[in-house]
Image (cartoon, grey):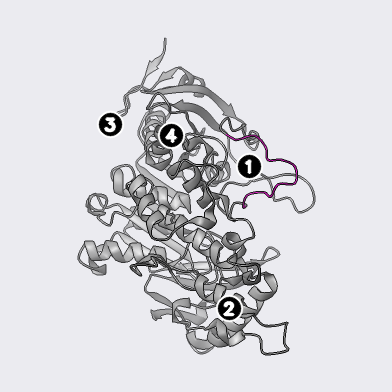
């Protein structure tokens, strides 16, 4: 006989399951439990990626490949051999692994996993986000959560692979990707938690970056009761305009063969930026604490007659100027999306490569314009942007500034963004933060519930020249559970596994300021101050 679970967060348990296997018998609305098994400590092995049933036939031999996914956009698989990363699952405790398929519509096929620690549960639930077009369970993020004692879950958002082939003629699958899969996952996860432990999770958190950051903001906007705390890193929340701008960058770099900026020219630009602006924040350390203060003109590195190295040609200068500038409507001059920042140059290949990045291109080919042969070099930044906005009608964006329902139950939100982000312009986060403050009567009115941290030198979600490793989860826990709001977070930078720089991350709009003495590689030599 199947167990029937009611999706409620009641104070008392519905009834208590005594084993992991019992969860395989559970019956939840619009869901099928595929398996419920105990995974021994350190024994988890991520399954192979499933075959994408919507993928087109392979391209002819010798045909150019579409652009690669950006760093940090999707969960990466590990492997053995030289340079292989350590096994992220080796130190995991024993847990109950539940796999399920959710079908809120007849065309839905949402895969979900819920992991429940066998012992040592901290009484809390942490959902983890995705990257790019998702299509994967975020196993490494789940491992991080369960290692901290959380019950955790992840979804593939209703399709497999990191491409958007699924979107053609499947509008319900687009809705599943946009927001429905995450909310359905949360409801089922909370019910399984209550069943397994005999009591509900006392607190619920969301942790994600990139698409995962967008998912966190979507939850706050559409389902404000789902979470008590949300971490939204580098959010792709203005998705349609983000992907328009992504093609803007690619068009700039590929306008003509002579326009293209390769690593040699990008290095010239990066060095010139540092020479012009590095010391403006009070310390020469290879980082720009706030790149918006750097008024760098690429024309300063224009090649002089007879010089062909260590400089840029006129077409390359023009390309750089466009990439440093926001995408704009050529007719109205309205800003579509903010620009890449000075200091981020070495990552420009992520969007500006010879072949466009597949993530934004897929948005237009499969989700919006329904034309697999669409050419991104033909994108019109006036008519096509209006058309895209009209077709999407806000489905894939998460830009609603009214977070008052989420704040009303004292929900907390931490946003962060790397200043050297090469895939999502960092001022996008500043713009959203500012829109919430404006909607809700000022920064002082939202400061008890929402804080933004900009990370100098960090690229997309991780990595980069600056201190880029920090514990936002602990900061959020202390805020939610102890009412200790984070003014700063300690960040570290490591080379070959050895920490070589520490620096405070400051609550925006403040930034780290050198005190005038002490090592520039030590956190204690800096304070947070107005920019």
As drawn, the label of residue 490 is none
User: Could one spot residue 422 in this view of the protein?
Assistant: no
| Mark nearer the viewer, 4 or 3 | 4
N-terminal of the pair, mark 2 or mark 1, is: 1
**Marks 2 and 1, Cα distance to the nearest angstrom?**
47 Å
x, y percent for residue 205: 39, 47
The residue located at (71%, 40%) in the rendering is: 60
Assign the N terminus to one quadrant of the image.
top left
- Rendering coords of residue 115 (x, y %): 50, 35
SS for callout 4: helix
Q: Sequence-wise, which precedes: disc 1 or disc 4?
A: 1
Q: Name the residue tied to disc 3.
A: 10
Q: Nearer the viewer, residue 302 or 126?
A: 302
Residue, disc 2: 317
Q: Quadrant of residue 303?
A: bottom right
Q: Earlier in the sequence, mark 3 or mark 2?
A: 3
Give the CA separation, mark 3 to mark 2: 62 Å
Q: In the figure, 317 relative to 498: above or below?
A: below
Q: What's the CA distance linking mark 1 and mark 4? A: 31 Å
Residue 84 appears in the rendering: yes
């Amino acid at each position: 006989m199947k167990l029937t679970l009611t999706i409620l967060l009641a104070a008392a348990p519905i009834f208590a399951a005594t084993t992991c296997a019992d969860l395989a018998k559970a019956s939840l609305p619009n869901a099928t439990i595929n398996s419920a098994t105990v995974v021994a400590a350190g024994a988890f092995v991520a399954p192979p990626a499933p075959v994408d049933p919507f993928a087109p036939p392979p391209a002819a031999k010798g045909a150019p490949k579409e652009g690669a996914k950006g760093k940090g956009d999707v969960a990466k698989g590990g492997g053995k051999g030289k340079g292989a990363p350590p096994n992220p699952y080796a130190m995991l405790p024993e847990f109950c692994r539940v796999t399920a398929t959710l079908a809120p519509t007849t065309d839905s096929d949402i895969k979900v996993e819920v992991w429940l620690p066998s012992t040592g549960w901290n009484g809390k639930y942490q959902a983890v986000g995705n990257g790019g077009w998702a299509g994967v369970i975020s196993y490494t993020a789940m491992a991080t959560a369960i290692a901290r004692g959380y019950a955790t879950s992840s979804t593939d958002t209703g399709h497999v692979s990191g491409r958007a082939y699924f979107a053609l003629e499947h509008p319900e699958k687009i809705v599943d990707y946009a927001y429905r899969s995450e909310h359905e996952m949360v409801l089922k996860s909370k019910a399984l938690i209550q069943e397994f432990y005999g009591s509900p999770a006392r607190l619920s958190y969301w942790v994600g970056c990139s698409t995962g950051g967008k998912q966190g903001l979507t939850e706050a906007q559409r389902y404000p009761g789902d979470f008590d705390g949300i971490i939204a890193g580098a959010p792709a929340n203005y998705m349609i305009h983000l992907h328009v701008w992504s093609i803007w960058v690619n068009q700039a770099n590929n306008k003509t063969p002579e326009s293209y900026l390769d690593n040699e020219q990008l290095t010239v630009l990066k060095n010139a930026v540092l020479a012009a602006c590095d010391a403006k924040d009070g310390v020469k350390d290879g980082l720009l604490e706030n790149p918006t203060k750097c008024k760098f003109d690429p024309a300063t590195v224009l090649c002089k007659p007879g010089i062909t190295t260590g400089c840029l040609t006129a077409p390359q200068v023009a390309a750089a100027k466009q990439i440093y500038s926001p995408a704009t409507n050529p007719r109205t001059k309205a800003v579509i999306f903010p620009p890449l920042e000075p200091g981020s140059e070495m990552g420009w290949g992520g969007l500006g490569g010879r072949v466009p990045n597949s993530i934004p291109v897929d948005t237009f080919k499969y989700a919006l314009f329904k034309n697999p042969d669409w050419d991104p070099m033909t994108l019109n930044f006036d008519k096509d942007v209006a058309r895209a906005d009209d077709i999407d009608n806000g489905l894939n964006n998460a830009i609603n500034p009214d977070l008052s329902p989420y704040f009303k139950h004292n929900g907390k939100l931490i946003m962060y963004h790397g200043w050297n982000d090469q895939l999502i312009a960092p001022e996008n986060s500043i713009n959203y933060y500012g829109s919430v403050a404006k909607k809700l009567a000022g920064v002082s009115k939202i400061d008890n519930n929402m804080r933004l941290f900009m990370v100098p030198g960090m690229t997309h979600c991780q990595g980069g020249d600056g201190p880029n490793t920090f514990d936002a989860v602990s900061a959020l826990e202390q805020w939610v559970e102890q009412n200790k709001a984070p003014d700063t977070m300690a960040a570290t930078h490591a080379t070959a596994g050895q920490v070589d720089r520490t620096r405070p991350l400051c609550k925006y709009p403040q930034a780290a300021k050198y005190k005038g003495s002490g090592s520039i590689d030590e956190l204690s030599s800096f304070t947070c101050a107005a920019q």
